[in-house]
Amino acid sequence: MLGLKLPTDPRWVNLAEKDLGEILTDHAYCEQKAATSCISLIQLNPDRERLVSELAPIVTEEWGHFRMVLAELKKRNLKLGRQRKDQYVNQLLKFQKKDGSPTDRLIEKLLTNALIEARSCERFRLLSLHMKEEHMRKFYHTFMVSEAGHYRLFLDLAMEYGEPEKVKERWQSYLDYEAEVMKEMDTRGDRVH
């Protein structure tokens, strides 16, 4: 369904479980950045009615997810750590084409967001299937379902605002590039991506 070309090694879950404070901290900041990204897309594209109406509730949802992760940290007597550089996202941003029309640049941002959501969905699925603690499996199942919907929405918006054949072609380029990024990155259990 997601189209990712390089699946995450399921053993990543074992690394993530070693320090829940670290993965929850990274997850919290991912949710915060997702909300901010949607706000930015709305601010840059107020004339695109569907984009504004579809992304506005996602801002609220992502911020709610941030608060859910904070509550999980608090429940476990863990503190929100410092935000770290997201090497994965930074690599994807390097792949974005910065030239072209405003619509071309919007498509690039939508595809980047779709890819981030797809990888998050895939990772949350692994956590929902393989974490030892039942509560955490359910916790991450909720996030997995949400990310799948966001991934689909970003792709649908890209198809609506761009030329579908060009969007499909560019999406395949993103998937190929992302697989190379994943090969080069260290598998770290303290990061969602």
Image (cartoon, rainbow, N blue to C red):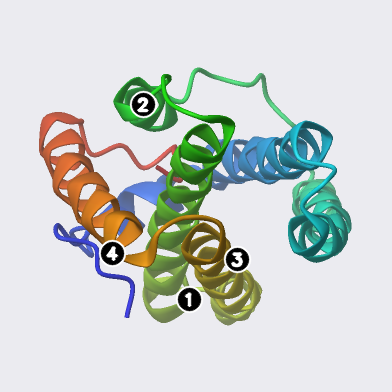
* Residue 193 at x, y percent in the picture: 40, 42
Please report whichever mark, 1 or 2, sits nearer to the chain's N-terminal start.
2
Please report whichever mark, 2 or 4, sits nearer to the chain's N-terminal start.
2
| Position of residue 94 in the picture relative to residue 147 (left or right) | left
Q: Nearer the viewer, mark 1 or mark 2?
A: 2
**Could you give the CA–CA distance between mark 1 and mark 3, rounded to whole angstroms?**
18 Å
Which residue is more in the foreground, 52 or 130? 52
Please report whichever mark, 3 or 4, sits nearer to the chain's N-terminal start.
3
Is the residue marked by circle 4 packed among few (<14), some (14-19), or many (20+) residues within 10 Å?
Answer: few
User: Label 3 near label 1: C-beta < 8 Å?
Assistant: no
**Could you give the CA–CA distance between mark 2 and mark 4, rounded to whole angstroms?**
17 Å
**Could you give the CA–CA distance between mark 1 and mark 2, rounded to whole angstroms?**
34 Å
Q: Which residue is mark 3?
A: 150
* Residue 126 at x, y percent in the picture: 37, 70
Q: Is residue 26 above or below residue 90?
A: below
Q: Is residue 149 above or below residue 184?
A: below
Q: Residue 97, which numbered label? A: 2
Query: Measuring 67% from the left and 44% from the top, which residue is drawn there?
Result: 34
